[in-house]
Image (cartoon, rainbow, N blue to C red):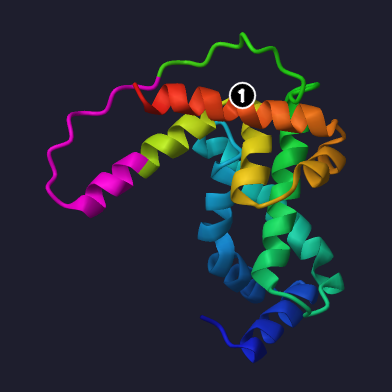
Amino acid sequence: METKQELQEIIEGCVKNKRKYQKKLFDLYYGKMLGVCLRYAKNPDEAKDMVQNGFIKVFKKLEVYNFTGSLEGWIRRIMVNTAIDQIRKNKKDPFHLNEEIQIKNLEEDAPFEAQEAENEVKIKAEKALKAISELPAGYRTVFNLFVIEGYSHKEIADFLNISEGTSKSNLAKAKQKLRQKLTR
């Protein structure tokens, strides 16, 4: 973990477009931000694109970071915005979805034989992430913003330019589809 002074040095180096510091910042937060983007993306390649685009924005906007609040939180917000922007580009209107959208079946994992509870939890987490990634874009985005990022339906509605009712409906449908997938 970097100290406040080290982070300030990295930020100042990035603002001066010094590659050494940009690489340090990228390496420091890449893993966490990839995790954020994986929740919004259809697949790992799309998530990596989101992270790359997000870091381009981070480096362009870093000079306005005012050292209030956590840098990680500030970067996370940019990554979420980047992911949503990319979803908007990929789909004309992903938030007004028909309930009859079909989701591909999850591949069945090999029977669980490991004896450690930690491995079982990891397998379940991987299944959950896979199921979330297979949700339609609108459902997935609202689910992530509400459940994982902690936004209210009003904030989501304002952020995505949809109604609160659409946000609530998409969340309910996302939860329903996830329950169906995960109970099979």
In the image, what residue occupies the spot 68% across and 65% down?
A: 73
The segment highlighted magenta reads: 106-124
On the question of residue 97 being in view, the answer is yes
What is the crowding at mark 1: few (fewer than 14 residues within 10 Å), some, or many (at least 20)?
some
**Whole-percent x and y of residue 17?**
76, 71
Locate residue 139 relative to residue 93 in the image: left or right.
left
In the image, what residue occupies the spot 72% across and 78% down?
A: 11
In the image, what residue occupies the spot 73% across and 57% down?
A: 77
Examine the structure image and report whether residue 15 is included in the region drawn in magenta: no
Total marks in image: 1
Q: Is residue 12 above or below residue 146?
A: below
Amino acid type of disc 1?
Lys
**Quarter occupied by the C terminus:** top left
**Whole-percent x and y of residue 148?**
59, 49
**Whole-percent x and y of residue 65?**
81, 73
**Secondary structure at numbered mark 1:** helix
**Whole-percent x and y of residue 155?**
81, 47
In the foreground, 153 or 59: 153
Indicate the quadrant where residue 12 lies: bottom right
Q: Is residue 111 above or below residue 157?
A: above
Locate residue 86 relative to residue 111 in the image: left or right.
right
Q: Is residue 140 above or below residue 20?
A: above
Residue that lies at the very extreme toward the top in this rendered image: 100
In the foreground, 22 or 35: 35
In the image, what residue occupies the spot 87% across and 71% down?
A: 64
In the foreground, 43 or 165: 165
- The residue where tag 1 is placed is 173
On the question of residue 89 being in view, the answer is no
